[in-house]
Amino acid sequence: MIKPTLILFHVFLCCSCATKPPVTHPPEIGGQTVPENNIVIDFRKSYNVYWRNGESVGVIPNARIIGYTGETARDVSGSYSKRYSTFGSWLVIEPCGAGRIYMPQGMVAYLQQNR
């Protein structure tokens, strides 16, 4: 027969071992908390896309991010293509008045929204 105190000990032990969710803190700049506004990137707008690849840096001005490639991307015929799966997903960027650019995601350093 199990004693009630033993059961309570097991319940206490299991409850006290549970991990607590991490406490998130908003970032600080200059010792002040940044406003808690969740900003969503509007991909209908154009951006200056700043990129970095090793020591090389550059900018693609006035471009829209229109999608990505990957294992679920469709090829020209409309069927699913796996030809990019070796490289992972690539961003598809379309500069104003120019052809599409296919860029590995890790190359984007930051975006600057155009007005």
Image (cartoon, rainbow, N blue to C red):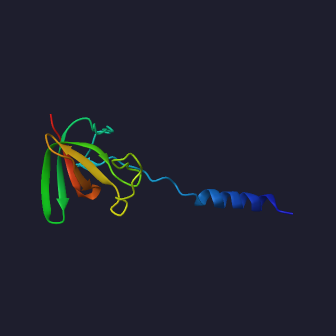
Q: Nearer the viewer, residue 6 or 91?
A: 91
Q: Going 45% across and 53% down the picture, which residue do you hit?
A: 22
Q: Residue at x 21, y 54 (%)?
A: 109
Which residue is rendered at x = 23% and y = 47% of the image?
93
The quadrant the N terminus occupies is bottom right
**Residue 25 image position (x, y, % from top left):** 36, 48
The furthest residue to the front: 77
* Closest to the observer, 84 or 44: 84
**Residue 33 point in image, percent of width and height:** 28, 44
Q: Quadrant of residue 85?
A: bottom left
Picture layout, residue 92 above or below residue 36: below
Q: Quadrant of residue 10?
A: bottom right
Measuring 28% from the left and 36% from the top, which residue is drawn there?
A: 42
Q: Quadrant of the C terminus?
A: top left
Q: Residue furthest bottom?
A: 54
29 is higher (above) or lower (below) than 106: above
- Residue 55 in view, yes or no: yes
- Most extreme residue toward the right is 1
Where is residue 46? Give x, y as percent: 19, 38
Relative depth, front residue between 86 and 104:
86
Q: Count of labels shown?
A: 0
In the picture, measured across the screen, residue 76 lies left or right of residue 100, that is right
Left or right? Give the position of 20 relative to 39.
Answer: right
Does the image show residue 30? no
Q: Is residue 49 left or right of residue 3?
A: left
